[in-house]
Image: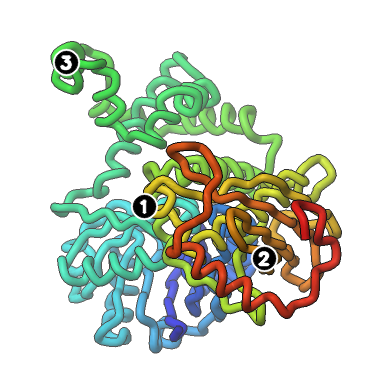
Amino acid sequence: MKVQKAAIIGGGVIGGGWAARFLLNGWDVDIFDPDPEAGRKIDDVLANARRALPGLYNRALPNEGRLRFATSMEEAVKNALWIQESVPERLDVKHRVLEILSAEKANNAILASSTSGFKPSQLNEKGANCIVAHPFNPVYLLPLIELVGDPQICADAADILHEIGMYPLRVRKEIDAHIADRFLEAVWREALWLVKDGVATTEEIDEAIRLGFGLRWAQMGLFETYRVAGGEAGMKHFMAQFGPALKWPWTKLMDVPDFDDTLVNLISGQSDTQSGHMSIRELERLRDDNLVGILRALKHRGSAAGAVIAAHEAGLDWPEGDGLPVTGDRTVPQSWTDYNGHMNETHYLEVGSQATDRFMEMVGADTAYIASGKSFFTAENHVRYLAEVHAGDRLRITTQVLAGGGKKMQLFQFIHRGDGELAATMETLLLHVNLETRRTEVPGPVVAEPLAKWVEAHAGLDWPEGAGRVGTR
């Protein structure tokens, strides 16, 4: 696969997040930022991304691309297919930068701005040719990108964003602050008033969000949440019941408190009390670990942002094996470690079971086959724990077929760490079952024939050390 290049102009929090998203999906990345601290800041963002993003997937991401710091914008954009402008939110600065980038970019390159508020017509009024690709922090974990601008360029951009695991949302019309930030601004204004008027502290407002409607919004958004709130009568009932409340004086939406020193000191002081015991890096890691847990739960159900991750994972390439088939290739997420600091024993079994599922797909016992009413059920497992595994370690699993005649399939999984050391083995005995009768039966040719080929291919291999603990040889 040809390695593609992205150029990131501006290496702050957002620019660094873009760089991490492309880099960890196999793209080469050139960054230009005149800040002498840019290298350190990018390294911090990349460390968080490497710690968090692979934990979303049950397959390994592509090999990481090459990262380079360019000495000029012109150098950075050379041969770049995607150019992302992430400079400060000042229109005069963006005009100067976008003018240079438009002149230097290749004809087929996509030039996009991370702006959270400006419209493409504003960005292009000095002759630039860019679209808006507005991300959300952390860019390396959150999939949403708001696309605004030329329809064909946005369509081409959407294809690339899908490839790196993101969800492009096309904004139908130009509007200040696009879609999502308009909601955030409304909530932000109301929160400022609640603090200023002494109704709530910053911590109490955050608790109201994260313990209440924030959890609903993460999976259902706004309208679907309210549809459910309407009960069996649905959205019409909800709107009829609560619609009149829109005219009640519940909000100061269009009235903004003065951002004077008193308010700034009040809010910053409460924020220090709330979270000052943790560094920003500690807060970022806490945020990322929580997001990975939430996103993995959503992925398991194929819901909301989890559906984006599941679709991206399904498109990741399986690596070629040297001899035995590769049935697993993944990174260990933070949530798999225990109080001893290494991977909990239950997850060795999980890794092995996922490898078994992959081998079932390889012999035709895939989701369609299971939907037809037949599958393999695990009868016995035997796991040997041979070496410690830590969060961030890459695991590669290969499978040897020990037996595959009649109703039985006997597999032996080799679980290797990325450094090549054998971390564990798992021997599995499975029985073929009719899901309607719940009784064992011999599989038909659609599975039996591919399985027989694997049995024949592995017949001459040595019997693995530790095998023979399940079933009969």
Residue 4: where, in percent of width, then height?
A: 43, 81
Disc 3 target residue: 237
- Amino acid type, callout 2: Ile
Give the crowd class for mark 1: few <14, some 14-19, many >=20 residues within 10 Å: many
- Amino acid type, callout 3: His
In which image quadrant can residue 185 be found?
top left
Front-most of 229 and 262? 229
Residue 340: where, in percent of width, then height?
A: 84, 44
- Amino acid type, callout 1: Leu
Q: Is residue 31 left or right of residue 231?
A: right
Query: What's the residue at 21%, 57% (across, down)?
Result: 119
Give the crowd class for mark 3: few <14, some 14-19, many >=20 residues within 10 Å: some
Query: What's the residue at 35%, 65% (across, down)?
Result: 161
Decide which of tag 1 and tag 2 comes sooner along the chain: 1
Q: Is residue 452 left or right of residue 81?
A: right
Which element type, helix, strand or loop, lies under badge 3? helix
Decide which of tag 1 and tag 3 comes sooner along the chain: 1
Which element type, helix, strand or loop, lies under badge 2? strand
Give the crowd class for mark 2: few <14, some 14-19, many >=20 residues within 10 Å: many
In which image quadrant can residue 400 be found?
bottom right
Disc 1 target residue: 144
Q: Is residue 169 above or below residue 29?
A: above
Disc 2 target residue: 397
Which element type, helix, strand or loop, lies under badge 1? strand
Front-most of 94 and 81? 81
Decide which of tag 2 and tag 3 comes sooner along the chain: 3
Q: CA distance from mark 1 to mark 2?
A: 32 Å
